[in-house]
Amino acid sequence: MSVVVIVLLCILLIIVIALFMSVTVSFSAGEDLRVKVKYAGIPIFELSPEKKQKQKEKRRKTAANPKALAKQKKAEEKKKLKAAAKKEKKERQKKDKTKPKRSLYQTLELVRALVSSAGKPVKRLFSHIRITNVIADIVVSGEDAAEAALNYGKLNAVIHSLLQLLYSTVRLSVEKIDINVDFQSQKTKYFISFKLKLRLSTALGCALWYAFRAAKRILAAKNEVGAENTAAEKGN
């Protein structure tokens, strides 16, 4: 077996393993908002007060360093020029293209085909989403005791309806749901957290399935419109 074949097989194996890895989103909201996205256990995005503080410190250090500030300005100018050139290129391409405008009927048929194609792929995608470690700790309040009691009832109804919907569409695992009412305070307090997991292969498979279904229905819609136009021309 040649070296090239071995290298290609190794690359293919890495791609297959990567596709079967999961994307994990950790979310929590309360006094602070925290969002962390990991792929195969590797952090790729983070939103937290600590992260914001580090960014502020970095900007402050950059502002205090003339060389770093000049370098940052140069990078920003380069980015702006690149964006302007890209925008100009898109506008030029739009002017060069002379596509005939779609009629309202054709546009509606296109939208209908796109929406109707999403049903099964979206349902399958949702059925493979795992939401675990769900915690909701909420203390409801209001301007007075009557409003607090009313808010408590409304929130209970919304939470239970949402849970029923999630149980029927995704793989849900609830750890704690605790809703209380505070008649003394006028400020509602809450803490909500969960983890969401989805395999990359599932997301990619559903996206390709949707693209195939949409392309098939769009083509059928175009053929139907073309047949109607031909019949109308013959009638005239």
Image: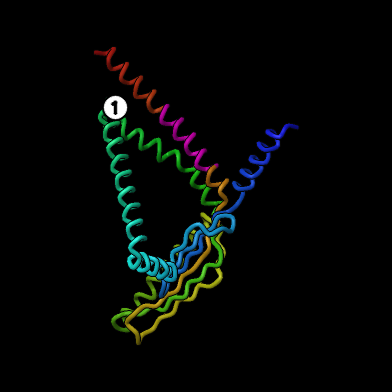
Residue 184 position in % (x across, y down): 35, 87
Q: Which of 107 and 194 is in front in this view?
A: 194
Picture colour scheme: rainbow
Residue bearing mark 1: 97
Residues 221 and 64: in front is: 64
Q: Which residue is drawn at 27% across and 15% down?
A: 233
- Residue 127 is situated, as x and y percent measured from the top left of the image, at 55, 51
Q: Nearer the viewer, residue 57 or 151?
A: 57
Magenta span:
205-219
Please give the name of the residue rendered at 35% of the width and 21% of the height, measured from the top-left corner: 226
Question: Going by the image, does 125 lie left or right of 9?
Answer: left
Q: Residue 150: x and y, percent?
A: 34, 76
- The answer, for residue 215, to whether it is visible in the render is yes
| Residue 155 relative to residue 173: left or right | left
**Figure quadrant of residue 161:** bottom left
Quick check: 173 above or below 20?
below
Residue farthest along the right direction in this orientation: 1
Q: Which is more toward the observer, 135 or 53?
A: 53
Circle 1: residue type: Lys
Q: Is 206 a magenta residue?
A: yes
- Give the position of the N terminus as an image quadrant: top right
